[in-house]
Image (tube, rainbow, N blue to C red):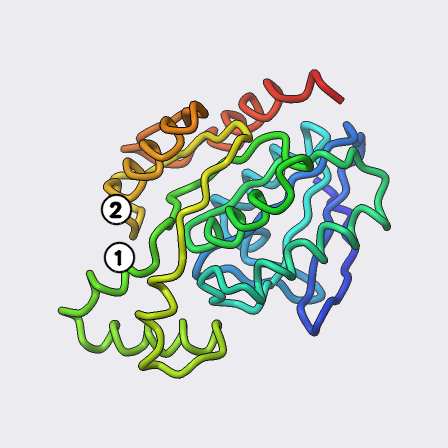
């Protein structure tokens, strides 16, 4: 499949826009996880076999896709969350797209995606979370037994939040798990996800409290046909233009 792409740069961070041969008018904002990257030519989601298959399925269905480097391992920092809004504004000035989009976020990327969803609720049709991370503080506390990884994780968060390492726990204490009024479906792989099902269940309870229950699909096999399943979910929320 011939993929047409355009690249933009904001605050030194690359964003790639992938344009289908037959656009359906809807955009999908992909916000990747720990291994995600975007440069002027390619991205993790284009290079990884599983993710690239999902990209192809989305393009074949007519979706315009955009994704950003977003400062790398941002861990949901306010700076990264702010950039997601600037990216949305830039792409929708340059591309002919319906202003109400779908979000597809993976792992750590869900932290920034959730912040975007909170601030731009009216612009989000639906959100698909893959192996999501909702609670950074809980993750940090879990890793205290693994001193090497713990120190690296704290340094990454301190850098992302532009604070000192000793301030990380206090800073994370201030973070809340954002709830959302948009339709949300989570795909959680019981083996491949580095994040616990427990924090997903907590998020599920928070959504139920505001009468906006999520859908949860537990995966135990490969990600085969996952792109098609996400497309089916997106299409359920496209009647209202």
Q: Which mark is residue 4?
A: none
Dividing the picture into quadrants, the one containing residue 62 is: top right
Residue at horizontal 48%, vertical 72%?
A: 160
The residue lying at 54 percent from left, 48 percent from top is 113
Report x, y in % for residue 61. 68, 27
Residues at marks 1 and 2, CA–CA distance in whole angstroms: 10 Å
Establish if 208 lies above or below 8: above
Quarter holding the C terminus?
Answer: top right
Residue depicted at 29% across the width and 39% down the height: 202
Relative vertical location of residue 65 with respect to residue 145 in this rendering, above or below:
above
- In the picture of the structure, the residue carrying the numbered disc 1 is 138
Of 17 and 121, nearer the camera is 121
Query: In front here: 158 or 91?
Result: 158
Mark 1 packing: few (<14 Cα in 10 Å), some, or many (20+)?
some
Q: Quadrant of the N terminus?
A: top right
Q: Are marks 1 and 2 in contact (CB under 8 Å)?
A: yes
In this rendering, position of residue 95 left or right of residue 240: right
Secondary structure found at label 1: helix
- Per the image, the residue denoted by label 2 is 196
Of residue 86 and residue 6, the one placed in the foreground of this image is 86
Q: Callout 2: 10 Å neighbours few (<14), some, many (20+)?
A: some
Residue 95 lies, in percent from the top left, at 84, 45
């Amino acid at each position: 499949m011939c993929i047409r792409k355009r690249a933009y740069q904001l605050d030194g961070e690359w964003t790639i826009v992938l344009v289908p041969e037959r656009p359906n008018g809807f955009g999908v904002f992909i916000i990747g996880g720990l291994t995600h990257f975007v440069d002027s030519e390619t991205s993790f989601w284009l290079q990884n076999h599983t993710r690239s298959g999902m990209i192809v399925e989305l393009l074949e269905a007519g979706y315009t896709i955009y994704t950003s480097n977003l400062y790398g391992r941002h861990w949901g920092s306010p700076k990264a969350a702010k950039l997601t809004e600037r990216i949305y504004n830039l792409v929708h000035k340059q591309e002919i797209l319906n202003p109400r989009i779908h979000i597809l976020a993976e792992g750590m990327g869900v932290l920034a995606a959730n912040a975007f969803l909170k601030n731009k609720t009216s612009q989000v049709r639906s959100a698909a979370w893959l192996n999501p991370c909702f609670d950074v503080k809980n993750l940090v506390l879990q890793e205290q037994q693994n001193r090497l990884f713990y120190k690296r994780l704290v340094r990454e968060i301190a850098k992302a939040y532009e604070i000192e390492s000793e301030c990380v726990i206090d800073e994370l204490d201030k973070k809340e798990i954002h709830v959302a009024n948009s339709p949300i479906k989570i795909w959680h792989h019981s083996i491949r996800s580095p994040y616990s099902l427990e924090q997903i269940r907590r998020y599920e309870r928070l959504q139920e409290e505001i009468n906006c229950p999520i859908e949860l699909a537990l995966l135990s096999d490969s990600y085969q046909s996952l792109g098609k399943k996400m497309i089916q979910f997106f299409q359920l929320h496209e009647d209202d233009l």
